[in-house]
Image (tube, rainbow, N blue to C red):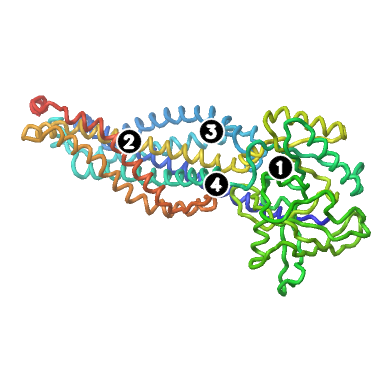
Amino acid sequence: MGKGGNVVSLAAFTLRDIRTSLLLLFAAVACVLLIACVNVANLLLTRALGRKREIAIRAAIGASRSRIIRQLLIESSVLSILGTGVGLLLACSLTGYLAANIPDAAWLPQSEQVHVDLRVFLFSFGLAVATGFLAGIFPAQHISRVDLANDLKDASRRNTPGRQQNSFRDALVVTEVALSLVLLVGAGLLTRSFEHLVAKDLGLRDHDTLVMKLSLPDSKYHERAQVSAFLKNLQNRLQSVPGIKDVGLSTCPLVSEPGYCPDTVFQIEGHPSPSGHLRDAEYKQVSPAFFRAAGVPLLAGRTFTERDGIGLDDKHPHSGQVIVDQAFARRFFPSENALEKNIELDWFVGNSPKQTLLKYEIIGVASDALERPDTVAQPVFYLPIFDGDSDDVNIVLHTVNAQAHVSTQAQSVIHQLDSDLAVFGVQTVGELVSSTIQSRTYIAGLFGAFAILAILLATVGLYGVVSSGVLQSRNEIAVRMAVGASAPHIFRMILLRGLRPTIAGVVAGIPCALIAVRFLQSLLFEIRPSDPLTFVAVTLLLVVCSSLASFLPARRAARIDPMAGLRSE
């Protein structure tokens, strides 16, 4: 019989999906790098403010501004090189692990050959050092503007940051939080999408069901009668194996890529096709017990018997029987009962050189069975497999338990029938379903790792800024407490100093995230890019992390001894 499929469209979709995923991962890496740069710039600026008097002394004894800038840039570059070295060591150790867990079929056919080569090493090293150098430029330029008259005064006065310095440091924190929010929203959407995929009901039994494949060689099974006799014998022998409840045979796997199974055009008796329009649907040839074995319930009518089909006489085929799924019935019989309707197929029967018009009566309607979690139900009709038209056989075994033992017994039975047959693709339905979402799982995991790294960097950066601000404002806090400010008031004041840039970063990051997540749309499943729950959860997470980052400095500030601070003042 005729075979077909949409292999080209499947490949195009897969390549587009992979390209989108790689671009998104590259964007995530760029966001983490920007957050790290902002973090470094903020911490370098905070550290430099604590050295303002030292820089003023250097300038007073003759150091030029360019020399001071060079000194500060060398210091930041040394830190950058050290950090880059540690990062590259981690990259070398993690590359093998990441490559080994890539879903090979959809990503890299030779993932075992992935490694950090010299070009990647030099590029990464140069990029990291350059970004570290650039992150130190602004703090170096800012601190090198020396005002000898003021900067040489008592350190307690000059250490207190001014409004302009505080505004700039807050702006850097806002940038960190906004970038972190974009990554966290993306990771949250992918995670929720993955949860929906895992929870998706395919309409199949995903437990106690074992599948395996075999292919009958044309040299031994070139006649339809031979194929039919072997399949009937195979079904009966497997049914007698202890631990097997039902045995189903099918020309198509239970779980597959869209377009893997063939489709064909057909006519509905008494319902001519509209002009210029052809009706088509996917078809599968199955055994009578297939629906019980696969856990696909029949909603109306009956299943096949061994007598159903067009017969084994190529020259005189008779009318056959067909079972359709719900999607088929909804599309082609929207307002009437599909049972007892007839469909007509122009197919090649056996080795006949010309097509034959075949009539099939619809004897049953089966529940929809999805090919994989991220697809929707498509029109499918089932034909009797015992007509012997296909050499490829997928065996579905509904087992009681001990599937490994059952698998061994089943393969032994097959080899007893024909020792030349190779059995392959032995898996449970649960394993098959998991394999179809490996790529999405991998992308969600990587994106989530980058998001976690981003929020850790933002939290550490905010903690450093707030903590340094408390140290530099120690005398100011002591004065406030001396004139009546209570410890809880100081605690709230410092806590709000950390929360303010976080809230501003959330406000700035939400519109950026709404724009960015549009590029995630092709990877999402049953969730909108603007999902409010994800945005609310991410916002709360950032506020909590900001509160934790500000909590210790705020508590430290609330415990400052005002007398000690005033004495230093």
> Percent x, y for residue 183?
43, 44
Q: Quadrant of the C terminus?
A: top left
Q: CA distance from mark 1 to mark 2?
A: 58 Å
In the rendered image, the residue lying farthest to the front is 301
Judging depth in this view, the residue of 427 and 28 nearest the camera is: 427
**Type of residue at label 4?**
Ser
Depicted 548 relative to depicted 394: above or below: above
Q: Secondary structure at mark 3?
A: helix
Of marks 4 and 1, which one's residue comes earlier in the chain?
A: 4
> Percent x, y for residue 390?
83, 49
In the rendered image, the residue lying farthest to the bottom is 275
Q: Secondary structure at mark 2?
A: helix
Of marks 1 and 3, which one's residue comes earlier in the chain?
A: 3
Q: For the residues labelled 1 and 2, say whether their Cβ atoms are less than 8 Å apart.
A: no
Give neighbour class at mark 1: few <14, some 14-19, many 20+ (Cα, 10 Å): many
**Type of residue at label 2?**
Gly
Of marks 1 and 2, which one's residue comes earlier in the chain?
A: 1
Would residue 156 be found to the left or right of residue 397 on screen?
left
Query: Which of the two marks, 3 or 4, is nearer to us in this view?
Result: 4
Q: What residue is shown with label 1?
A: 293
Give neighbour class at mark 4: few <14, some 14-19, many 20+ (Cα, 10 Å): many
